[in-house]
Amino acid sequence: MPIAHWDPVRELLSLQERMNRIIDQTLSRSHSEGELSSSGAWSPAVDLYESDKSLILKAELPEVEQSDIELSIDEDRVTLRGQRRLKEEVSEKQFLRMERSYGPFHRTFELPASVDAEKVKAEFKRGVLTVTLPKRASEKGRQIPISG
């Protein structure tokens, strides 16, 4: 029978790498630029980007029912709430491994004052929520002629 040598330094380095990954993932999600709050049992991945005419927010919500999603806009912020439910055909006791999170989520993002809240549109397709937040016409840049 071969003798296995225990290397405590290698074990500590491996543990430190795993802890660093967990901390990095947690901090990158909870301290995103422009995010006011994130709470709940889990937090969906979100992209927020700007085009010439609007801001677009895309949220990954796999296995979340449309009826379990709530979207609201209030002055200078957009809030996304919802819940991913564990399917009833499988109980927690049956799981050998459970890595995906279930339960409620809540994300709030700051918006520039230029968003026209009356014209916001949302579409939920194939597990992705796409929210289009049009810019106000008066807030768009315009060319100023220079006389001389």
Image (cartoon, rainbow, N blue to C red):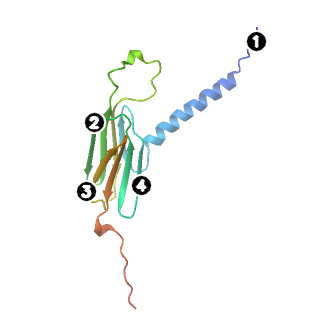
Give the Cα separation between the discs numbered 4 and 1.
56 Å
Q: Residue flagged by tag 1: what amino acid is it?
A: Ile
For the residues labelled 4 and 1, say whether their Cβ atoms are less than 8 Å apart: no
Query: Tag 4: Cα neighbours inside 10 Å, few (<14), some, or many (≥20)?
Result: few
Work out whether mark 3 precedes mark 1 in sequence or the reverse, and give the earlier one. 1
The amino acid beneath tag 3 is: Ala
Look at label 4 and name its amino acid: Tyr
Which secondary structure lies at badge 2? helix
Which badge, 2 or 4, is on the more N-terminal residue? 4
Q: Give above or below for 80 relative to 146.
A: above
For mark 4, what is the residue?
49
Q: Which element carries disc 3, helix, strand or loop?
A: helix
Spatial separation of the CA atoms under disc 2 and disc 3: 22 Å
Residue at 29 percent of width and 68 percent of height: 137
* Alpha carbon separation for disc pair 3 and 1: 69 Å
Q: Residues within 10 Å of mark 2 (few under 14, many from 20)?
A: few
Disc nearer the start of the sequence (2/3): 2
State the quadrant of the N terminus.
top right
Q: Are marks 4 and 3 in contact (CB under 8 Å)?
A: no
Name which of mark 4 and mark 1 comes first in the sequence: 1
- Residue 111 coordinates in the image, percent (x, y): 33, 55
Tell me the distance, in whole angstroms, between the alpha carbons under discs 4 and 3.
17 Å
Residue 117, disc: 3
Q: Earlier in the sequence, mark 1 or mark 2?
A: 1
